[in-house]
Image (cartoon, rainbow, N blue to C red):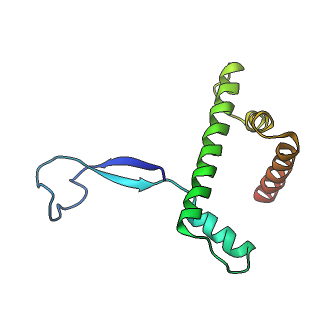
Amino acid sequence: MAKISKTVDKADKPPTEGQEASGKKRKRNIDKGYETYIHKVIKKVTDGKTISSKGLEVVNMLICDLEARLSDKAFELTRFQKKSTLAAPHIQTATKLLFPPEMSGQAIVVASDALQKFTQ
């Protein structure tokens, strides 16, 4: 599970037990993942059945890996075209390059439909 460290200034929060009252900063871990959403989708699709925590962790890692690959390829395409803004065509092209043809076509159609629903 991927975690991001974020520094928090002690002036924002009062010191708790085990912390120094000086002006030092401490790190707080923030989860970056899709566990909540995966759990909700699986529960809805499978009529109330759930997934184990290990299975949830594996699916979350898979989604995070795919997200990282897609974004890296899309940014690479953006730099190749000498653009400073990432746009939808960059994501579509990255999807076509990373996934098999049938899967990429289906993914683009589903994403386009979701975007149209969201913008209406």
Of residues 12 and 61, the one nearer the viewer is: 61
Left or right position of 23 against 26: left
Query: Please, which residue is most extreme toward the bottom here?
Result: 48
Q: Residue at x 78, y 40 (%)?
A: 99
Task: Residue 47: name its quadrant.
Answer: bottom right
Q: Residue at x 79, y 56 (%)?
A: 114
Question: Compared to 4, does 15 lie above or below?
Answer: below
Question: Compared to 66, does 43 lie above or below?
Answer: below
Left or right position of 22 against 86: left
Instruction: Give the percent coordinates (x, y) of residue 112.
Output: 82, 50
For the C terminus, the image quarter is bottom right
Is any part of residue 85 visible from this angle? Answer: no
Task: Residue 42: name its quadrant.
Answer: bottom right
Question: Compared to 59, does 52 lie above or below?
Answer: below
Instruction: Give the percent coordinates (x, y) of residue 102.
Output: 88, 45
Q: Residue at x 22, y 47 (%)?
A: 25
